[in-house]
Amino acid sequence: MTAVLDEKLEPIFQDVLRRNPGETEFHRAVHEVLESLGPVLVKYPEFAEKKIIQRICEPERQIIFRVPWQDDKGEIHINRAFRVEFNSALGPYKGGMRFHPSVYLGIIKFLGFEQIFKNALTGLPIGGGKGGSDFDPKGKSDAEIERFCQSLMLELYRHLGEYTDVPAGDIGVGSREIGYLYGQYKRITNRYESGVFTGKGLGWGGSRARTEATGYGTVFFTEEMLKARGDALEGKKVVVSGSGNVAIYAVEKAHELGATVIACSDSGGFIVDEQGINLETLKRIKEVERRRISAYAETHRHARYIAGAESTSIWSVPCDIALPCATQNELTGRDAKTLVENGCIAVAEGANMPTTPDGIRIFQDAGVCFGPGKAANAGGVATSALEMQQNASRDSWTFEYTQKRLQEIMVNIHRNCHETAAEFGTEGDYVLGANITGFIRVAKAMNAMGLI
Ligand code: NDP
Ligand code: 2IT
């Protein structure tokens, strides 16, 4: 957080620091947006007069609760869960649930804050929210996951509703967890309210292409950034971090568009397969067997597995395009420098806030196309909104049609960010373009609704 803020914005940021002590990820997310807003306040002085930014930085509602559950041996565990209902100016709160031991209020607030602007960028009627728990799903049995989800929902259900708050998945929460959460919601409320969750299974209200949407959308966004410079994905070497939901489908779409993904990872290490990651193996290991990425090298003996250590990073693998799809702060200034030295030309964030601020600056100074998460990974939540549309009309669309809608949304987000960046400052600065486009949509709606 080294960039200097506009004199009107610095006191707002200081207030956020004072009111939210210790929440470093949230501070960073706020700072990154405020850095872009100076020129907006010049064009729209009413946003400053009405204290829109100060209001946006304060969640509308924050819920923190206890989740007690019993493991298979009968031992009792207590976790903490959160739902931060950040902003409902554009629609019901919308955003995923994250299960990971690192989760605390500061992470959920950073994710919820990002979600406000990301959701606004989609152009669809969804507000911003996020939730999760410090529960660690690793090594838990299916029955333990089920009991945990049921216990969590016994409290959370009262805060949800298709017109109120609509959760989905994130790290550690996929269709299995959504099934247990939704089933418990349905049981407690006695309502078959499909639109209260997204990321549901295809047999019970889910949307085709939702599973693929975030990864596919990130690759569509990358293709648009390259097109704007007269280039394309075809023939490019790509490195994707992570090997979860977002990463797997980023690999799939990158291959479909003629690129070769040569590396991916998990929190234990990374694999390099110069022949191109074999998708069938990747999906089997991660989606079916739920094993570590190291298992890939057992099937494909020519591939290398490098166990995680401070000195080695997946970003040391030379590539044309880097897609960080694992977690926050996974791509540092040092990694960015290595990528630039190795000739990387484009970076798109499939994950939320994976690149550190010095990393972003290094990419931008070097002229690398940089697509920030709130634009590049918006395809997931956009397709969630398409799932809500299908649920509301009791309809279900084909894969081709849903994917076409997703692609149109990503093309639009890219165009809007590109045009807004040019209007307000620097051509090609997608960070500026995304922050300003998302912010103006939310601010205009809040301004029209009185003092909310
Ligand atoms: P998954 O749980 O499916 O996969 C997460 C992947 O990231 C795993 O490979 C995991 O490795 C790795 N990872 C997680 N935490 C760490 C860590 N601390 N250090 C290193 N690696 C880590 O999650 P998703 O794919 O759904 O989410 C990935 C990112 O994308 C997150 O930032 C999420 O917020 C973002 N996102 C997700 C969307 C969605 O629709 N799912 C939409 C938009 C953004 P391991 O298994 O070893 O933990
Ligand atoms: O970060 C995100 O955008 C998500 N985890 C998806 C949210 C959603 O509601 O689909």
Image: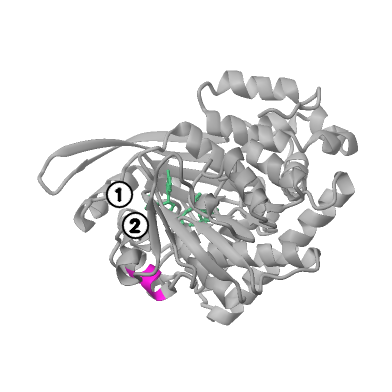
Magenta region: 280-284
- For residue 101, which quarter of the picture? top left
Residue positioned 52% across, 59% down in the render: 240
Q: What amino acid is labelled 1 in the image?
A: Pro
Q: What amino acid is labelled 2 in the image?
A: Glu
Does the segment drawn in magenta span residue 82?
no
Residue 210 lies, in percent from the top left, at 51, 67
Identify the main secondary structure in magenta: helix
Residue 38 lies, in percent from the top left, at 82, 33
Q: Residues within 10 Å of mark 1 (few under 14, many from 20)?
A: some
For residue 366, side relative to residue 266 (left or right)? right
Between 81 and 61, the one nearer to me in the picture? 81
- For residue 343, which quarter of the picture? bottom right
What's the mark number on residue 137? 1
Whichever of callouts 1 and 2 sits on the residue coming sooner in the sequence is 1
Numbered disc 1: secondary structure: loop
- For residue 223, which quarter of the picture? bottom right
Number of marks in picture: 2
Using the numbered discs, state the Cα–Cα distance from disc 1 to disc 2 in whole angstroms.
10 Å
Residue at image mark 2: 177
Q: Quadrant of the N terminus?
A: top right
For residue 294, side relative to residue 270 (left or right)? left
Q: Are marks 1 and 2 in contact (CB under 8 Å)?
A: yes
